[in-house]
Amino acid sequence: QQPVQSPQAVILREGEDAVINCSSSKALYSVHWYRQKHGEAPVFLMILLKGGEQKGHDKISASFNEKKQQSSLYLTASQLSYSGTYFCGTEYQVTGGGNKLTFGTGTQLKVEL
Amino acid sequence: KAGVTQTPRYLIKTRGQQVTLSCSPISGHRSVSWYQQTPGQGLQFLFEYFSETQRNKGNFPGRFSGRQFSNSRSEMNVSTLELGDSALYLCASSFQASGRSYEQYFGPGTRLTVT
């Protein structure tokens, strides 16, 4: 089941904040966040694990509500460089371990002057 | 540290042909995952290889296959190409021990066009 991301698109003025949400219908083991700029590969931003462990960038924060199977990505004081498509990738506990990310449809974010 | 590399970057094939794509992971990374990206379907997981074994598999037909070599380099093969196979194929490597999830590092992708 593909996670649902919202909003689908957002336009910000430089300096504004944004929140991107990711919801799953299944219990989650981890949530990954990636940003992809046009014509480039997705770049890792943040990983949140069941149990509370997080790893990511200093200027980007995220939350993971295990009970609601939801994650939110918080972008504060946005910069032009934040523009791109943001994907959440959800992971369920798979037999044998390993990575099997199911990505959402993405949120297009554009930051303008 | 060198990033993930993929070859070739662009490929044009005809329906019915087969194609092999290559991915070299970041040094020290033993897990390689493959994804298909299209405007309509987004990023879809194909399979993951770890220590030369396919560990996870997505919902793609058997025409899509892969393998991993002892140096962790991976190849993906698509046989009997269809027009719908036109996509950006991304590989991602990650450090993997066991028991937890690790961030993935994506390569630049191979743009496959099937005519």
Image (tube, rainbow, N blue to C red):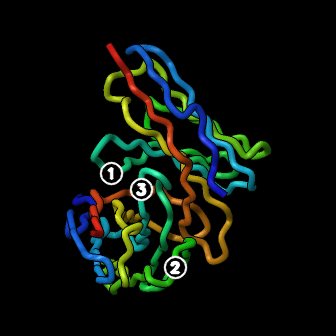
Circle 1/circle 3 CB separation < 8 Å: no
Residue A36 visible in the shown view:
yes
Q: Residue at x 28, y 66 (%)?
A: B112
**Same-subunit check for callouts 1 and 2:** no
Compared across the picture, whether B66 is left or right of B114 comes to: right
Which residue has dot 3 on it?
A: B38
Q: The N terminus of chain B appears in which quarter of the rendering? A: bottom left
Element type at mark 3:
strand
Which residue has dot 2 on it?
A: B61
Which quadrant of the view contains residue B6? Answer: bottom left
The chain identifier of the residue carrying mark 1 reads A
Image coordinates for residue A98, horizontal then vertical, percent: 55, 70
Image coordinates for residue B94, horizontal then vertical, percent: 42, 64
Image coordinates for residue B82, horizontal then vertical, percent: 38, 74
Element type at mark 2:
loop
Circle 2/circle 3 CB separation < 8 Å: no
Q: Residue at x 74, y 51 (%)?
A: A25
Q: Amino acid at mark 3?
A: Thr
Which residue has dot 1 on it?
A: A41
Q: Residue at x 50, y 55 (%)?
A: B41
The residue closer to the viewer here, B82 or B49, is B82
